[in-house]
Image (spheres, helix red, strand yellow):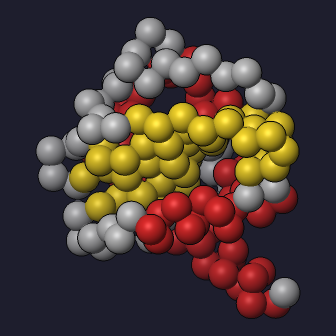
Amino acid sequence: MRIVLIIIAVLIAAGVVSYFLLKKKGLIDLVANRVKAQKVDVATVDGECRFDDCMIWFKELKLNKGTDIPFIMDYTKNKEMFAGGEFNTPITKPSAVMLGVLKEKGGEMSHIQIIQCDKLDDKLVEVLHSSKDGLIVLD
């Protein structure tokens, strides 16, 4: 359990630092301005969306640390940013999270997954609430 808490603390710290660095690059603005995505997947989970499952999704993508910028966004909190855009996804569940990967060069989203669910697990809630904008950049 102690290791899990240390990992969460490191992820939160890395996310906060990365967030402030990438805000200058306009990551939130890029997402909000409906940057072209190669593929947008929508998944519905009956029950709880877990932080660990989100991390597995990113690991399976085999991202390039030098050029890929993975992030998690509280889609429920920020869905009004996407009204009328290509990511506009009707949410039928109480909660939703967006997992995404931004290509540093060109500003293109290589992967986007919107997961709507009944609730987010405690780890995911804690990570998302560590940012006032509901966006965490993973390092």
Q: Residue furthest left?
A: 106
Question: Viewed as shown, does residue 50 lie left or right of 89?
Answer: right
Q: Mark yes or no: residue 26 visible.
A: no
Q: Nearer the viewer, residue 37 or 47?
A: 47
User: How many numbered circles are shown?
Assistant: 0
Question: Viewed as shown, does residue 84 lie left or right of 118?
Answer: left
Measured as percent of width and height from the top left, residue 82 is found at: 48, 20
The quarter of the rendered structure image containing the C terminus is: bottom left
The quarter of the rendered structure image containing the N terminus is: bottom right
The answer to which quarter of the image holds residue 50 is bottom right
Measured as percent of width and height from the top left, residue 61 is found at: 39, 64
The answer to which quarter of the image holds residue 69 is bottom left
Is residue 96 positioned above or below 71 on the image? above
Measured as percent of width and height from the top left, residue 75 is found at: 61, 34
The residue lying at 40 percent from left, 16 percent from top is 85
The residue lying at 22 percent from left, 43 percent from top is 107
Question: Viewed as shown, does residue 124 lie left or right of 31?
Answer: right
Q: Nearer the viewer, residue 45 or 99?
A: 45
Is residue 73 positioned above or below 65 on the image? above
Measured as percent of width and height from the top left, residue 120 is found at: 79, 48
The residue lying at 30 percent from left, 43 percent from top is 109
Q: Mark yes or no: residue 34 visible.
A: yes
The residue lying at 47 percent from left, 71 percent from top is 59
Q: Residue furthest bottom?
A: 3
